[in-house]
Image (tube, grey):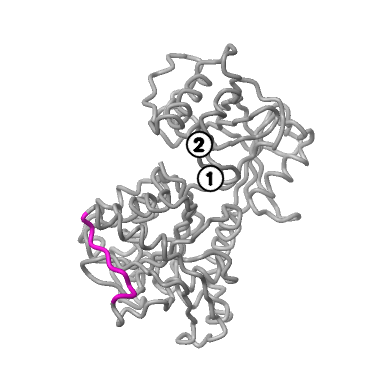
Amino acid sequence: MSGVFGVIAPHPPIMVPEVGGRDAEVTSASMRALAEAARMLERFDPDTVVVMSPHSPGLADAFVVETASRLAGTLAQFRAPEVSLSYDGDPALAQQLLARLDERGVPGLDRATVPTLRSGELDHGVLVPMSFLDRSGRWPVLALSLSYLPYDQHRILGEELAGAAADLGRRIAFVASGDCSHRLTREAPAGYSPRGQELDSQLVSLIEASDFEGLERLDPSLVEAGGECGLRSFITLGGAARPAHARVLSYEGPWGVGYLTALINEEFVASDTPAAGDKGGVAGSHEHPIVILARRAIEAYVTRAEVLEPASLDDESLPDRAGAFVSLHRGRNLRGCIGTISPTRDTLEEEVVRNAIEAATHDPRFPELESPELVDLDIKVDVLHAPEECSFEDLEPSTYGVIVTCGWRRGLLLPDLEGVDTPQQQISIACRKAGIETGEKVALERFKVDRYA
C-alpha cells in the first residue's frame, strides 16, 4: 500500500489569469477545483511533488526522468513572461527511480544525458497546474515524461515511483497533468469527433469509480478517436497511489477540450479526530470483533509487513459494506486516524483492514507506528450509516456526525467527539477541513455511526 496523495489536473495555458485574462473565467470550475487541490496539497505537505506532463520532452520507447537539481520555466510563449516558476529538483529520488526501473526491466532514461531533451526546463504541462498548486516553489519537483510504451508499463512506472519514495523515506504527491478529449466540438483545436464526448464520459466514470485499472482496458479506437493527452499520466498515478480512492472535483469542456480535476487518496490529508480524548479499546480488554480485526491488521502490517486477509466477522448486525473510520490513541493522545465516508471495498472487513493500516502508517501528521507502540494502543472503529439531508436544527453533535458541502468541497466530522458540543462547532470544524470560508453557503447532511471499542 502506498501513501501517495494525487491530483489529476488539466493544463490549458489560457486558464492561467495572466494568460487568459477574462477568457480564463470560462474555466472557472477547473480553477476553483485546483484551488481546492492546492489547499489539500498544503495540508498533505509532501517532501516532493512529482509531475507527469505529456508535453515534457520524451521518447517513444523509454520513460524520461528529470535528474536536475534545479528546474524552471515561464509562460512567455503564451504572452505571460511574468509567470515564471522555479523549484528545487530531487535528484536522489530520480536516480532511485531509474535504478528500480532498470531492475524491473522497464526502459528509463536520465534526461540530463540527452542535450536535446533540455534538462531543467519546465513545459506548460507542468507550469500550468503548478501555477495553481505551488507558485512559490515551496516543494521540490520531480518531472516525468510519458512514453508510448504500453499502458501497463506506465502503471509499473507508478508502482516503482512509490517504491523509490518509500526507499528514501519520501512522502510524495503526484500531479497527473493531462487533458481529456481535444475533439468535443466542431471548433475544437484537434477537429471534431463524435466519440470525443464518449471518451470523456468513460474517463470521468472510471475515475469516479476509482477504477484506474479500467483505464488500461479502454477501447484503443475510442482513445484514438477522442484525441486525449492525459490517459497515460492518469494510469501512472493509479500505479503510484494504489489503492487509489478518487473524488472528481470538476469536469468541463470549453473550447472543445475536456478538463478533469480530481483528488486521489484525500483521506490521507485530513482527519476529523481531536488530538486528545478517551477512546476505549486497549489490547487485553474485551474488544468487539471488528476492533480485534483492526488490531490484527495493524500488528500484521507493522511487525511483518503483511496485509491481513480478513475472514468474515459473521455478525448480522454489521452491514456488508460501509464507510469506516479507524482512530488510534496512545494514552489520551491521537496517534492516527484514517477513514472513508462511503465504502470503497467489497466488504466491510476489507474496508476496516485497509483503513486500520493507513491510520497506523500513512496519517500525514504522524510517523509510521512502530512495534513497541502496539502494547498500549487504543483502537476505535466507527462504521458509518448512510447520510441524510438535514437542517441546522436537526444536528445534535452527541448523536449525529455532519457532512458539509459547498460546490465540489466536502468536509466530515464524526459524532460524539470530545470538545465538540454544539452544531456550530461541528460545522465550523468540518468547513475548515474542507477549505470552506466563513459565510459561504453550505448544504448539510447528518449521519449516525456505530462505534466499536
Q: Quadrant of the N terminus?
A: top left
In the image, residue 22 lies at what x, y percent? 58, 80
In the image, residue 129 lies at what x, y percent? 49, 68
Residue range (magenta): 105-113
- Say which residue label 2 marks: 342
Q: Is residue 123 above or below residue 316?
A: below
Name the residue: 52% across, 57% down.
47
- Say which residue label 1 marks: 268
Residue count near mark 2 (Cα–Cα under 10 Å), binned few <14, some 14–19, many ≥20: some
Name the secondary structure under disc 2: loop
Give 105 or 60, whichever is nearer the viewer. Answer: 105
At label 1, which amino acid type do we have?
Phe
Identity of the residue furthest to the front in this view = 372
Residue 47 covered by magenta stretch: no
At label 2, which amino acid type do we have?
Ser
Residue 107 covered by magenta stretch: yes
Q: CA distance from mark 2 to mark 1?
A: 15 Å
Name the residue: 53% across, 85% down.
80
